[in-house]
Structure formats: structure tokens, C-alpha cells
């Protein structure tokens, strides 16, 4: 590694698995100190033990505003400052189509996927301003935040909101030296894929391998994505190399949103059904 994040302090929400875990590992390898903010305590404590003093675990429910405020405060207490906030925590949300989506399911989805991103901006920006240092805020959007048809209504709408938060952040925070950018993953093989289709956690890895084999050829670049593909871009956005980059949403999708989607939205459902029924 190149030490791109040497002496930087970062928070990664949803940092115990998938994209979050890959990002934690890469941030640490690049020299950062990282707070893993999640609700999976056993996994979080295990990651902190494995990666050593560079990592601190903090139980954080990102749907609770007080918890987001607290993790920022605990980060500063533990490591002395904050340089990077990565709003990554998420799940599939309510799977109902528009004609069946209720207000409760929609509100729950938005609270997890969009409101948490807004609050992450709020408290990270307050800390950056107090330090007078500026900082980098990164948020996980989605290909579903760029186009319709990739996911259910609640998820799609919430991820579109993430893009809007990033753009508004430029208007309000750029004068303070605070950068805000998002990453829009395409099809990434993480545990959330298994949860989305009701596959038991113990089958998450073989399910991901099955989907990768079935769907790789449907992607313009010839393969599906891996968590570290996102972590690499997050590392760039967190680093000083991206010092003039703000307000953008970077698709990390193997080119999928650059071309007509074709039948992919049905391909993934058919492949998941084939796996679960075999």
C-alpha cells in the first residue's frame, strides 16, 4: 500500500461486512485509524481485535440521530479528530412495489438509507468545522440511485435522495473545505445480496459465487463487482488525491449504467430463483 490515508481518522458505518468491511481493511492498510460503526457487536469487536489499535468498534444504529452524534463524539475522544465520514450502512429496505408500499415501510427504508446519510453529513460537518480542517464525506448510493428499475421503489427513491444530499452538501459545505461525494455500486457480491432474496446467512457465500457465475457475462466489463472494487474508490475519495473532487456520484458498476440495462433486472431474479429452488 501507499500510505494514502496516513494520519487520517475515519468512520465507516456498516463496517462489519461487505463493502464496509472491505473499506475498513483498505483504509487501515493505507494508514488510517478507523471507527467501525455498526450494530453487529460480535463481528465489530472481532474486527477491532484482528486489526489492532488502528480500529475501534462503536455500536451505532444509524436510524437513531443520537447514535450518529455519539459515534462522531466517541471517534474524536478515542482518536483525537475526524477526517473522513463514510455513510455506508444499509439494507434492501421494504421490497414492496409502488402500488403496495406503505408509509411505515417507506419511512423505515428512507430512515436507514437516506436520513442516516443526511445526519452523517450533519454531525461530521459540525466536527470538521469545529476543527477548522475541512474533511471528506463519502456516501454509498447505488445504480438504483441513478436509474429506475434496479430495485424496489423504496430503495430506489432513497438512493436517489443520497445523490441529492451530496449535491446540496456542495452548496452548503464546500466553502468550509468539506467535500461530499457518493459511490454508486452496481451489482456487488456482498451479503446484502443473499438477504435481499431470503437466502440463509450460511449460504451467502455460495449464493454470491453462483450469481457471479450466472451474471458476470451480462455486465459490460464481463464480471460482477466485489466489495474491494468499492473500497478502492472510497480510498481515493477519502485521500488528498481527491482534494478538488466534490459533489459527484461515481458509478462503480462495470459500465452497467452507461448502457441500456436490457434484461438484467429479470436475470438476477431468475438466477436467484434457480438457486433457491434447486
Image (cartoon, rainbow, N blue to C red):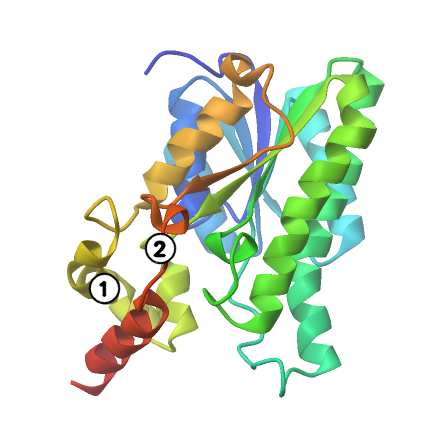
Q: Earlier in the sequence, mark 2 or mark 1?
A: 2
Q: Is residue 52 something that shows in the picture?
A: no
Q: Which residue is mark 2?
A: 187
Q: Position of residue 72 (x, y in %)?
A: 72, 35
- Residue 211, disc: 1
Whole-percent x and y of residue 166?
68, 39
User: Which structural element holds mark 2?
Assistant: loop
**In the foreground, 218 or 227:** 218
Depicted 222 relative to depicted 123: above or below:
below
Mark 2: few, some, or many residues within 10 Å (few <14, many ≥20)?
A: many
Residue 36: name its quadrant: top right
Compared across the picture, whether 136 is left or right of 230 comes to: right
Residue at left 31%, top 44%? 254
Can you tell which mark lies on residue 57?
none
The reply to whether dot 2 and dot 1 touch (C-beta < 8 Å) is: yes
Quarter of the C terminus within the rendering: bottom left
Q: Nearer the viewer, residue 40 or 270?
A: 270
SS at mark 1? helix
Q: Residue furthest front?
A: 260
Which quarter of the figure is the N terminus placed in? top left
Q: Is residue 278 left or right of residue 20?
A: left
Amino acid at each position: 500500500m501507499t500510505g494514502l490515508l496516513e494520519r487520517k481518522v475515519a468512520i465507516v458505518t456498516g463496517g462489519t461486512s461487505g463493502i464496509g468491511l472491505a473499506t475498513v481493511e483498505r483504509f487501515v492498510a493505507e494508514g488510517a485509524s478507523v471507527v467501525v460503526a455498526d450494530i453487529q457487536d460480535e463481528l465489530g469487536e472481532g474486527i477491532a481485535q484482528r486489526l489492532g489499535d488502528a480500529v475501534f468498534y462503536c455500536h451505532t444504529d444509524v436510524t437513531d440521530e443520537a447514535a450518529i452524534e455519539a459515534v462522531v463524539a466517541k471517534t474524536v475522544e478515542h482518536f483525537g479528530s475526524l477526517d473522513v465520514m463514510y455513510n455506508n450502512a444499509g439494507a434492501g429496505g421494504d421490497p414492496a412495489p409502488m402500488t403496495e408500499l406503505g408509509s411505515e415501510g417507506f419511512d423505515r427504508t428512507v430512515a436507514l438509507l437516506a436520513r442516516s446519510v443526511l445526519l452523517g453529513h450533519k454531525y461530521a460537518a459540525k466536527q470538521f468545522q469545529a476543527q477548522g480542517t475541512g474533511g471528506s464525506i463519502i456516501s454509498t448510493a447505488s445504480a438504483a440511485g441513478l436509474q429506475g428499475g434496479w430495485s424496489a421503489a423504496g430503495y430506489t427513491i432513497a438512493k436517489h435522495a443520497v445523490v441529492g444530499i451530496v449535491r446540496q452538501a456542495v452548496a452548503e459545505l464546500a466553502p468550509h473545505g468539506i467535500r461530499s461525494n457518493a459511490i454508486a455500486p452496481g451489482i456487488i457480491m456482498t451479503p446484502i445480496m443473499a438477504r435481499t432474496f431470503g437466502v440463509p446467512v450460511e449460504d451467502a457465500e455460495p449464493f454470491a459465487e453462483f450469481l457471479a457465475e450466472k451474471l458476470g457475462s451480462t455486465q459490460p466489463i464481463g464480471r460482477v463487482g466485489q466489495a474491494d472494487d468499492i473500497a478502492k474508490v472510497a480510498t481515493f475519495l477519502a485521500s488528498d488525491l481527491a482534494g478538488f473532487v466534490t459533489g459527484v456520484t461515481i458509478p462503480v458498476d462495470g459500465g452497467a449504467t452507461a448502457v441500456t440495462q436490457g434484461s438484467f433486472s429479470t436475470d438476477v431474479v431468475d438466477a436467484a430463483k434457480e438457486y433457491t429452488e434447486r
